[in-house]
Protein backbone atom coordinates (compact mmCIF):
# COMPACT_ATOMS: atom_id res chain seq x y z
CA UNK A 1 0.00 0.00 0.00
CA UNK A 2 1.24 3.49 -0.84
CA UNK A 3 1.74 5.71 2.22
CA UNK A 4 -0.51 8.84 1.94
CA UNK A 5 1.25 12.14 1.13
CA UNK A 6 2.22 14.48 3.96
CA UNK A 7 -0.47 16.90 2.81
CA UNK A 8 -3.13 14.19 3.12
CA UNK A 9 -1.76 13.11 6.52
CA UNK A 10 -1.96 16.68 7.81
CA UNK A 11 -5.55 16.99 6.66
CA UNK A 12 -6.40 13.67 8.30
CA UNK A 13 -4.66 14.85 11.50
CA UNK A 14 -6.76 18.02 11.55
CA UNK A 15 -10.05 16.19 10.96
CA UNK A 16 -9.22 13.60 13.62
CA UNK A 17 -8.13 16.37 15.99
CA UNK A 18 -11.49 18.13 15.69
CA UNK A 19 -13.44 14.87 16.11
CA UNK A 20 -11.44 13.66 19.13
CA UNK A 21 -11.54 17.19 20.58
CA UNK A 22 -15.34 17.15 20.56
CA UNK A 23 -15.32 13.68 22.08
CA UNK A 24 -13.12 14.85 24.95
CA UNK A 25 -15.19 17.99 25.34
CA UNK A 26 -18.16 15.81 26.27
CA UNK A 27 -16.22 13.91 28.96
CA UNK A 28 -15.83 14.78 32.65
CA UNK A 29 -12.81 17.06 33.01
CA UNK A 30 -11.91 15.89 36.53
CA UNK A 31 -11.51 12.28 35.46
CA UNK A 32 -7.84 11.34 35.92
CA UNK A 33 -7.61 9.39 32.64
CA UNK A 34 -9.08 12.30 30.67
CA UNK A 35 -6.65 14.66 32.38
CA UNK A 36 -3.65 12.48 31.50
CA UNK A 37 -4.71 12.26 27.87
CA UNK A 38 -5.14 16.01 27.65
CA UNK A 39 -1.75 16.45 29.31
CA UNK A 40 -0.17 14.16 26.71
CA UNK A 41 -1.84 15.99 23.81
CA UNK A 42 -0.73 19.31 25.28
CA UNK A 43 2.85 18.07 25.45
CA UNK A 44 2.91 16.78 21.86
CA UNK A 45 1.46 20.08 20.60
CA UNK A 46 3.97 22.11 22.61
CA UNK A 47 6.93 20.07 21.31
CA UNK A 48 5.74 20.61 17.73
CA UNK A 49 5.58 24.38 18.28
CA UNK A 50 8.99 24.32 20.03
CA UNK A 51 10.55 22.57 17.03
CA UNK A 52 9.13 25.19 14.67
CA UNK A 53 10.41 27.97 16.91
CA UNK A 54 13.83 26.33 17.14
CA UNK A 55 14.25 26.60 13.40
CA UNK A 56 12.58 29.99 13.02
CA UNK A 57 15.40 32.47 13.63
CA UNK A 58 18.13 30.78 11.54
CA UNK A 59 15.59 30.36 8.78
CA UNK A 60 14.43 33.99 8.81
CA UNK A 61 17.98 35.29 8.91
CA UNK A 62 19.38 33.15 6.12
CA UNK A 63 16.33 33.41 3.80
CA UNK A 64 16.19 37.18 3.98
CA UNK A 65 19.94 37.80 3.71
CA UNK A 66 20.29 35.38 0.79
CA UNK A 67 17.00 36.52 -0.78
CA UNK A 68 18.04 40.19 -0.72
CA UNK A 69 21.48 39.37 -2.07
CA UNK A 70 19.93 37.49 -4.99
CA UNK A 71 17.35 40.17 -5.69
CA UNK A 72 19.84 43.02 -5.52
CA UNK A 73 21.91 41.15 -8.07
CA UNK A 74 18.90 41.32 -10.38
CA UNK A 75 18.41 45.03 -9.67
CA UNK A 76 14.81 44.31 -8.80
CA UNK A 77 14.91 45.05 -5.16
CA UNK A 78 13.08 48.39 -5.41
CA UNK A 79 10.21 46.86 -7.24
CA UNK A 80 9.97 44.05 -4.70
CA UNK A 81 9.95 46.46 -1.78
CA UNK A 82 7.31 48.71 -3.26
CA UNK A 83 5.01 45.95 -4.48
CA UNK A 84 5.29 44.12 -1.17
CA UNK A 85 4.46 47.12 0.99
CA UNK A 86 1.63 48.29 -1.30
CA UNK A 87 0.13 44.81 -1.32
CA UNK A 88 0.30 44.53 2.47
CA UNK A 89 -1.29 47.95 3.03
CA UNK A 90 -3.95 47.45 0.35
CA UNK A 91 -5.16 44.06 1.58
CA UNK A 92 -5.17 45.11 5.24
CA UNK A 93 -7.23 48.17 4.30
CA UNK A 94 -9.78 45.98 2.50
CA UNK A 95 -9.96 43.66 5.52
CA UNK A 96 -10.62 46.56 7.88
CA UNK A 97 -13.33 48.08 5.67
CA UNK A 98 -14.96 44.67 5.41
CA UNK A 99 -15.00 44.20 9.18
CA UNK A 100 -16.26 47.70 9.89
CA UNK A 101 -19.03 47.41 7.31
CA UNK A 102 -20.15 44.04 8.66
CA UNK A 103 -20.27 45.54 12.13
CA UNK A 104 -22.50 48.39 10.95
CA UNK A 105 -24.81 46.02 9.12
CA UNK A 106 -25.18 43.31 11.76
CA UNK A 107 -24.56 45.40 14.90
CA UNK A 108 -23.56 42.46 17.14
CA UNK A 109 -23.48 44.68 20.24
CA UNK A 110 -27.19 45.55 20.07
CA UNK A 111 -29.32 44.01 22.78
CA UNK A 112 -26.30 43.29 25.00
CA UNK A 113 -25.89 45.09 28.28
CA UNK A 114 -22.39 46.11 29.31
CA UNK A 115 -23.41 45.45 32.95
CA UNK A 116 -23.28 41.73 32.09
CA UNK A 117 -19.54 42.06 31.80
CA UNK A 118 -19.02 44.42 34.74
CA UNK A 119 -17.24 41.85 36.90
CA UNK A 120 -14.77 40.83 34.24
CA UNK A 121 -14.02 44.46 33.40
CA UNK A 122 -13.51 45.43 37.01
CA UNK A 123 -10.97 42.70 37.61
CA UNK A 124 -9.01 43.49 34.51
CA UNK A 125 -6.03 45.76 34.48
CA UNK A 126 -5.22 46.92 31.01
CA UNK A 127 -1.64 47.64 30.15
CA UNK A 128 -2.18 51.22 29.01
CA UNK A 129 -0.35 52.16 25.85
CA UNK A 130 -1.29 55.27 23.91
CA UNK A 131 -0.66 55.67 20.19
CA UNK A 132 2.52 57.80 20.39
CA UNK A 133 4.08 55.41 22.92
CA UNK A 134 3.08 52.46 20.79
CA UNK A 135 4.65 53.95 17.66
CA UNK A 136 7.81 54.83 19.60
CA UNK A 137 7.98 51.36 21.07
CA UNK A 138 7.50 49.78 17.66
CA UNK A 139 10.18 51.92 16.00
CA UNK A 140 12.62 51.29 18.81
CA UNK A 141 12.09 47.55 18.57
CA UNK A 142 13.34 47.54 14.97
CA UNK A 143 17.01 48.13 15.61
CA UNK A 144 18.27 45.75 18.22
CA UNK A 145 21.61 44.11 18.97
CA UNK A 146 21.36 41.13 16.60
CA UNK A 147 22.68 38.68 19.20
CA UNK A 148 19.98 39.74 21.64
CA UNK A 149 17.38 39.59 18.88
CA UNK A 150 18.53 36.10 17.89
CA UNK A 151 18.51 34.78 21.42
CA UNK A 152 15.15 36.32 22.32
CA UNK A 153 13.49 35.15 19.12
CA UNK A 154 12.69 38.75 18.14
CA UNK A 155 11.65 38.13 14.54
CA UNK A 156 11.14 41.71 13.41
CA UNK A 157 14.58 42.81 14.61
CA UNK A 158 16.16 39.77 12.93
CA UNK A 159 14.34 40.68 9.69
CA UNK A 160 15.82 44.19 9.81
CA UNK A 161 19.34 42.99 10.60
CA UNK A 162 19.13 40.40 7.81
CA UNK A 163 18.10 43.15 5.37
CA UNK A 164 21.24 45.11 6.27
CA UNK A 165 23.43 42.03 5.89
CA UNK A 166 21.83 41.17 2.53
CA UNK A 167 22.43 44.67 1.17
CA UNK A 168 26.00 44.76 2.51
CA UNK A 169 26.69 41.41 0.84
CA UNK A 170 25.61 42.81 -2.51
CA UNK A 171 27.59 46.01 -2.16
CA UNK A 172 30.66 43.98 -1.19
CA UNK A 173 30.17 41.80 -4.28
CA UNK A 174 32.91 39.26 -4.97
CA UNK A 175 34.71 40.09 -1.74
CA UNK A 176 32.08 38.38 0.42
CA UNK A 177 31.30 35.51 -1.90
CA UNK A 178 32.33 32.91 0.68
CA UNK A 179 29.98 34.32 3.33
CA UNK A 180 27.13 34.37 0.83
CA UNK A 181 27.84 30.78 -0.15
CA UNK A 182 27.92 29.72 3.51
CA UNK A 183 24.64 31.49 4.20
CA UNK A 184 23.07 29.80 1.19
CA UNK A 185 24.25 26.41 2.42
CA UNK A 186 23.08 27.14 5.93
CA UNK A 187 19.69 28.07 4.50
CA UNK A 188 19.52 24.75 2.66
CA UNK A 189 20.40 22.83 5.81
CA UNK A 190 17.70 24.70 7.73
CA UNK A 191 15.09 23.90 5.09
CA UNK A 192 16.12 20.25 5.37
CA UNK A 193 15.38 20.40 9.10
CA UNK A 194 11.99 21.94 8.34
CA UNK A 195 11.29 18.87 6.20
CA UNK A 196 12.07 16.62 9.16
CA UNK A 197 9.96 18.65 11.57
CA UNK A 198 7.05 18.44 9.15
CA UNK A 199 6.90 14.67 9.66
CA UNK A 200 5.55 15.48 13.10
CA UNK A 201 3.01 18.00 11.74
CA UNK A 202 0.02 15.63 11.38
CA UNK A 203 0.41 14.52 15.00
CA UNK A 204 1.24 18.02 16.28
CA UNK A 205 -1.74 19.62 14.56
CA UNK A 206 -4.04 16.85 15.79
CA UNK A 207 -2.84 17.27 19.39
CA UNK A 208 -3.21 21.07 19.30
CA UNK A 209 -6.75 20.88 17.93
CA UNK A 210 -7.81 18.24 20.47
CA UNK A 211 -6.55 20.43 23.28
CA UNK A 212 -8.14 23.56 21.89
CA UNK A 213 -11.59 22.07 21.44
CA UNK A 214 -11.62 19.89 24.56
CA UNK A 215 -10.78 22.77 26.88
CA UNK A 216 -13.13 25.46 25.49
CA UNK A 217 -15.79 26.67 27.86
CA UNK A 218 -18.84 26.87 25.60
CA UNK A 219 -21.01 28.70 28.13
CA UNK A 220 -18.98 31.87 27.59
CA UNK A 221 -19.99 32.03 23.98
CA UNK A 222 -23.70 32.53 24.49
CA UNK A 223 -23.87 36.30 24.72
CA UNK A 224 -20.97 36.90 22.37
CA UNK A 225 -22.12 34.36 19.77
CA UNK A 226 -23.30 36.98 17.29
CA UNK A 227 -20.05 38.94 17.53
CA UNK A 228 -18.05 35.74 17.01
CA UNK A 229 -20.14 34.89 13.97
CA UNK A 230 -19.71 38.34 12.45
CA UNK A 231 -15.93 38.36 13.00
CA UNK A 232 -15.40 34.80 11.81
CA UNK A 233 -17.76 35.24 8.85
CA UNK A 234 -16.04 38.39 7.59
CA UNK A 235 -12.56 36.97 8.18
CA UNK A 236 -13.54 33.91 6.16
CA UNK A 237 -15.07 36.09 3.45
CA UNK A 238 -11.76 37.92 3.20
CA UNK A 239 -9.74 34.70 3.19
CA UNK A 240 -11.92 32.56 0.96
CA UNK A 241 -13.27 35.13 -1.53
CA UNK A 242 -11.43 38.48 -1.53
CA UNK A 243 -7.79 37.36 -1.25
CA UNK A 244 -8.12 34.46 -3.74
CA UNK A 245 -9.93 36.83 -6.13
CA UNK A 246 -7.08 39.35 -5.95
CA UNK A 247 -4.64 36.49 -6.47
CA UNK A 248 -6.54 35.21 -9.49
CA UNK A 249 -6.94 38.63 -11.10
CA UNK A 250 -3.24 39.40 -10.80
CA UNK A 251 -1.57 36.04 -11.28
CA UNK A 252 -4.22 33.73 -12.79
CA UNK A 253 -3.45 31.17 -10.05
CA UNK A 254 -6.79 29.50 -9.30
CA UNK A 255 -8.12 29.29 -5.73
CA UNK A 256 -8.09 25.51 -5.97
CA UNK A 257 -4.41 25.41 -6.86
CA UNK A 258 -3.59 27.95 -4.21
CA UNK A 259 -5.40 26.21 -1.37
CA UNK A 260 -3.99 22.81 -2.34
CA UNK A 261 -0.49 24.26 -2.09
CA UNK A 262 -1.13 26.39 0.99
CA UNK A 263 -3.02 23.83 3.06
CA UNK A 264 -0.14 22.70 5.29
CA UNK A 265 0.60 26.27 6.34
CA UNK A 266 -3.06 27.22 6.82
CA UNK A 267 -3.72 24.23 9.07
CA UNK A 268 -0.54 24.86 11.06
CA UNK A 269 -1.52 28.52 11.52
CA UNK A 270 -5.05 27.54 12.53
CA UNK A 271 -3.87 25.11 15.16
CA UNK A 272 -0.89 27.08 16.55
CA UNK A 273 -2.47 30.59 16.34
CA UNK A 274 0.99 31.94 15.61
CA UNK A 275 2.17 33.33 12.27
CA UNK A 276 5.77 33.25 13.44
CA UNK A 277 5.70 29.63 14.61
CA UNK A 278 4.09 28.78 11.25
CA UNK A 279 6.71 30.69 9.25
CA UNK A 280 8.94 27.70 8.42
CA UNK A 281 5.90 25.89 7.04
CA UNK A 282 4.67 28.99 5.17
CA UNK A 283 8.04 29.40 3.46
CA UNK A 284 8.10 25.76 2.51
CA UNK A 285 4.58 25.93 1.02
CA UNK A 286 5.37 29.13 -0.90
CA UNK A 287 8.60 27.80 -2.38
CA UNK A 288 7.86 24.13 -2.89
CA UNK A 289 4.12 23.90 -3.49
CA UNK A 290 3.32 27.30 -4.97
CA UNK A 291 6.60 27.65 -6.86
CA UNK A 292 7.51 31.11 -5.62
CA UNK A 293 11.18 31.87 -6.32
CA UNK A 294 13.22 31.51 -3.09
CA UNK A 295 14.58 35.08 -3.37
CA UNK A 296 11.04 36.52 -3.50
CA UNK A 297 9.50 34.15 -0.93
CA UNK A 298 12.53 34.56 1.36
CA UNK A 299 11.88 38.27 1.52
CA UNK A 300 8.07 38.64 1.34
CA UNK A 301 7.01 35.77 3.61
CA UNK A 302 9.15 36.48 6.72
CA UNK A 303 8.41 40.20 6.49
CA UNK A 304 4.71 39.44 6.02
CA UNK A 305 4.65 37.10 9.02
CA UNK A 306 5.54 40.02 11.26
CA UNK A 307 3.78 43.00 9.65
CA UNK A 308 1.08 41.78 7.25
CA UNK A 309 -1.94 40.68 9.25
CA UNK A 310 -5.26 41.01 7.46
CA UNK A 311 -7.16 38.88 9.97
CA UNK A 312 -5.79 40.83 12.92
CA UNK A 313 -6.50 44.22 11.29
CA UNK A 314 -10.07 43.16 10.58
CA UNK A 315 -10.49 41.90 14.13
CA UNK A 316 -9.08 45.01 15.81
CA UNK A 317 -11.40 47.35 13.91
CA UNK A 318 -14.51 45.19 14.28
CA UNK A 319 -13.91 44.61 17.99
CA UNK A 320 -13.42 48.35 18.62
CA UNK A 321 -16.73 49.18 16.94
CA UNK A 322 -18.37 46.33 18.86
CA UNK A 323 -17.14 47.74 22.18
CA UNK A 324 -18.36 51.22 21.19
CA UNK A 325 -21.74 49.76 20.41
CA UNK A 326 -21.77 47.90 23.71
CA UNK A 327 -20.96 50.91 25.88
CA UNK A 328 -23.43 53.02 23.90
CA UNK A 329 -21.01 55.38 22.16
CA UNK A 330 -21.77 56.40 18.59
CA UNK A 331 -18.49 56.91 16.79
CA UNK A 332 -18.43 59.85 14.36
CA UNK A 333 -17.07 59.30 10.82
CA UNK A 334 -13.82 61.00 11.91
CA UNK A 335 -13.52 58.63 14.86
CA UNK A 336 -14.15 55.70 12.56
CA UNK A 337 -11.26 56.88 10.40
CA UNK A 338 -9.08 56.92 13.51
CA UNK A 339 -10.15 53.34 14.25
CA UNK A 340 -9.28 52.42 10.66
CA UNK A 341 -5.73 53.76 10.91
CA UNK A 342 -4.97 52.65 14.44
CA UNK A 343 -6.28 49.15 13.64
CA UNK A 344 -3.81 48.98 10.78
CA UNK A 345 -0.92 50.21 12.92
CA UNK A 346 -1.91 47.84 15.72
CA UNK A 347 -1.96 44.90 13.30
CA UNK A 348 1.42 45.85 11.84
CA UNK A 349 2.88 46.16 15.32
CA UNK A 350 1.37 42.95 16.69
CA UNK A 351 3.94 40.14 16.84
CA UNK A 352 2.87 36.85 15.26
CA UNK A 353 2.12 35.07 18.51
CA UNK A 354 -1.17 33.85 20.04
CA UNK A 355 -3.49 36.66 21.16
CA UNK A 356 -1.01 39.39 20.26
CA UNK A 357 -3.87 41.26 18.62
CA UNK A 358 -5.61 41.57 21.98
CA UNK A 359 -2.65 43.34 23.49
CA UNK A 360 -2.28 45.90 20.73
CA UNK A 361 -6.04 46.45 20.68
CA UNK A 362 -5.81 48.50 23.86
CA UNK A 363 -4.34 51.23 21.69
CA UNK A 364 -7.20 51.12 19.18
CA UNK A 365 -9.76 51.40 21.96
CA UNK A 366 -7.95 54.27 23.61
CA UNK A 367 -7.52 56.18 20.37
CA UNK A 368 -11.23 56.94 20.39
CA UNK A 369 -11.72 57.05 24.14
CA UNK A 370 -13.19 53.59 24.65
CA UNK A 371 -12.47 51.79 27.94
CA UNK A 372 -9.42 49.54 27.65
CA UNK A 373 -10.93 47.26 30.31
CA UNK A 374 -13.46 46.14 27.69
CA UNK A 375 -10.74 43.77 26.48
CA UNK A 376 -11.75 41.58 29.42
CA UNK A 377 -15.02 40.85 27.61
CA UNK A 378 -13.20 39.54 24.58
CA UNK A 379 -10.34 37.64 26.21
CA UNK A 380 -12.23 34.41 27.00
CA UNK A 381 -13.24 33.93 23.36
CA UNK A 382 -9.93 35.01 21.89
CA UNK A 383 -8.22 31.65 21.66
CA UNK A 384 -10.95 30.48 19.32
CA UNK A 385 -11.14 33.62 17.18
CA UNK A 386 -7.35 33.67 16.91
CA UNK A 387 -7.38 30.41 14.91
CA UNK A 388 -9.13 31.77 11.82
CA UNK A 389 -7.50 35.19 11.90
CA UNK A 390 -4.00 33.69 12.11
CA UNK A 391 -4.77 31.39 9.17
CA UNK A 392 -5.88 34.41 7.12
CA UNK A 393 -2.79 36.35 8.22
CA UNK A 394 -0.59 33.54 6.91
CA UNK A 395 -2.66 33.19 3.74
CA UNK A 396 -2.05 36.88 2.99
CA UNK A 397 1.71 36.33 3.18
CA UNK A 398 1.66 33.47 0.69
CA UNK A 399 -0.64 35.35 -1.69
CA UNK A 400 1.62 38.39 -1.31
CA UNK A 401 4.65 36.37 -2.39
CA UNK A 402 2.81 35.10 -5.50
CA UNK A 403 1.65 38.62 -6.40
CA UNK A 404 5.10 40.13 -5.92
CA UNK A 405 6.64 37.36 -7.98
CA UNK A 406 4.23 38.22 -10.80
CA UNK A 407 5.43 41.83 -10.76
CA UNK A 408 9.14 41.04 -10.77
CA UNK A 409 9.04 38.37 -13.46
CA UNK A 410 12.11 38.58 -15.60
N1 LIG B 1 -2.12 35.24 16.49
C1 LIG B 1 -1.98 36.17 15.42
C2 LIG B 1 -0.82 35.78 14.53
O1 LIG B 1 0.10 35.15 14.98
C3 LIG B 1 -1.78 37.57 15.90
C4 LIG B 1 -3.05 38.02 16.59
O2 LIG B 1 -3.21 37.81 17.78
O3 LIG B 1 -3.93 38.56 15.91
O4 LIG B 1 -0.82 36.07 13.36
Image (tube, rainbow, N blue to C red):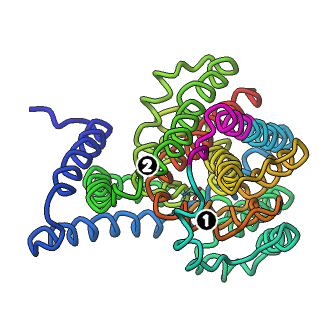
Residue depicted at x 63% and y 39%: 107
Residue 193, quarter of the rendered image: bottom left
Determine if the magenta segment contains residue 181: no
Disc 1 is placed on an element classified as helix
Q: Position of residue 305 (x, y in %)?
A: 62, 53
Residue depicted at x 46% and y 63%: 380
Q: Position of residue 244 (x, y in %)?
A: 58, 25
Q: Which residue is mark 2?
A: 270
Ligand 1, seen in the image, is in the quarter at: bottom right
Q: Is residue 391 left or right of residue 178?
A: left
Q: Nearer the viewer, residue 18 or 51?
A: 18
Callout 2: few (<14), some (14-19), or many (20+) C-alpha neighbours within 10 Å?
Answer: many
- SS assignment for the magenta stretch, majority: helix
Determine if the magenta segment contains residue 95: yes
From the image, which quarter does the N terminus lie in? top left
Ligand 1: does it lie within 8 Å of the C-beta at label 2? no
Q: Which residue is mark 1?
A: 375
Disc 2 is placed on an element classified as helix
Callout 1: few (<14), some (14-19), or many (20+) C-alpha neighbours within 10 Å?
Answer: many
Q: Nearer the viewer, residue 144 or 96?
A: 96
User: CA gap, disc 1 to disc 2?
Assistant: 22 Å
Residue depicted at x 70% and y 33%: 101
Q: Earlier in the sequence, mark 1 or mark 2?
A: 2
Q: Nearer the viewer, residue 127 or 56?
A: 127
Residue 310, quarter of the rendered image: top right
Residue depicted at x 40% and y 64%: 49
Residue bounds of the magenta highlight = 94-111
Amino acid sequence: MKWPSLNAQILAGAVLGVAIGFYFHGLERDDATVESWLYAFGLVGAVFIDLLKMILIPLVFTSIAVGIANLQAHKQVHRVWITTLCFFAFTMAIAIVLGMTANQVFRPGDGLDVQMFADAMQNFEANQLALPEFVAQFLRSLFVNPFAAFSQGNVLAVVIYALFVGIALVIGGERYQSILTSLREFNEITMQMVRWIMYLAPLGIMALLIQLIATQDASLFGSLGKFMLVVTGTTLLHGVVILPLILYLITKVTPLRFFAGAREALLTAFSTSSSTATLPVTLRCAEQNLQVRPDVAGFVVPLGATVNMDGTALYEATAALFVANLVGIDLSPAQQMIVFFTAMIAAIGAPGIPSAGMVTMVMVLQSVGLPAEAIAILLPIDRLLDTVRTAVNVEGDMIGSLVVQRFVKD
